[in-house]
Amino acid sequence: MNLSQLQTRVAREIVALARLDALRAGDHLAESVLAERIGVSRSPVNVALRYLVEVGAVVHDHNRGFFLDKDAADLSAIAQELSQEPDDPLHLKIAEDRLSGALPDFVTEADMMRQYNVARSALRKALSRIQEEGWVERSIGHGWTFLPMIDSAQAYEESYLYRTALEPTGLLSPWFRADPVELAALRRQQRAIVDGGYKTMTPIELFESNSRFHETIAKWSGNRFLVQSIKRMDSLRRLVEYGQAKDRKPRQEQAIEHLAILEAIAAQDLLKAAGLMREHLEGARQRKVRSKSVFKSAA
């Protein structure tokens, strides 16, 4: 079965969630629950599950639905294979060229069509996705203007300072309400990372679990503008961080810090949770500044 880019991402997310939740052979994979957790409709979830049936990870009962065919801990090979499946090559190439400085601040569709040897429809599809991620906007006619993105060590540090100003504030929002089911799931997932998942999870799984943690807490704030800001920052970080999980020990340390924040939220000590979140983000910022590992060319 040939999957679309969306279906590949959904299949990857299903496997990642199963691994984070430490599901066992025979556990039910409810399409509606998966669709809600991944943030897509049920249609791509159904296609992705049928693909996972084909590769031996899932079984399908026509009356009861889909079930894991093996323990999630035994899905490492499939997780690695799905992580190696290329995202939209054009989207990735534009991101690489922008990060390297090969694309100017302003471009026309005609220039990009020639540069990448693609049809206008394919280019506009990629640009529409980039526009949703927040690092390009349409200009007059057929032009596009690139917006600031995380393309240097300084920009990376600025992004952490921005998040440090926002995320702890969200925890102190008068509308903050933690969903108990989501809270339990986050604690379970972060514990799985601490207990060895940081060694076996793919870079994409590690980043997405981190992103899910921060975006879920932002959602609990009840502040739609804060949620929008954190999602945009994660989109920008995603461009440079998927390949940055070679040093895995910090991932375990981050998950330990995540658990402490979640424990404070569970105890309804939001002042403590906000302080821990500030320390967590500041510590991450300092590690990035010291290592400059994301942007090797940085002075």
Image (tube, rainbow, N blue to C red):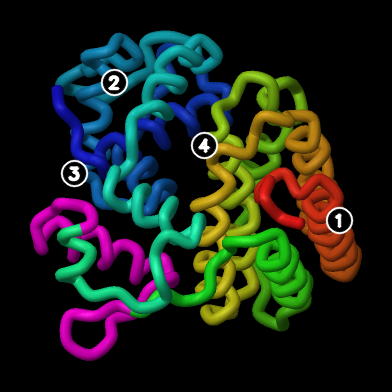
Within-10-Å neighbours for mark 3: few <14, some 14–19, many 20+: few
Marks 1 & 2, CB-CB < 8 Å contact: no
Closer to the chain start, of discs 2 and 4, is: 2
Q: Residue at x 55, y 14 (%)?
A: 73
Disc sitting over residue 52 in the figure: 2
In which quadrant will I find the N terminus?
A: top left
Front tag of 2 and 4: 4
Q: Indicate the secondary structure of the residue bearing disc 2.
A: helix
Specify the segment rendered in magenta. Answer: 115-144
10 Å crowding of disc 1: few (<14), some (14-19), many (20+): few
Q: Please, what is the three-letter code of the amino acid marked with disc 4? A: Ile
Q: Tell me whether the residue at label 3 lies in contact with that at label 2, contact meaning CB atoms closer than 8 angstroms.
A: no
In which quadrant of the rendered view does residue 132 lie?
bottom left
Q: Which residue is mark 4?
A: 204
How much space separates mark 1 and mark 3, taking CA atoms?
A: 42 Å
Q: Say the numbered circle drawn on residue 286.
A: 1
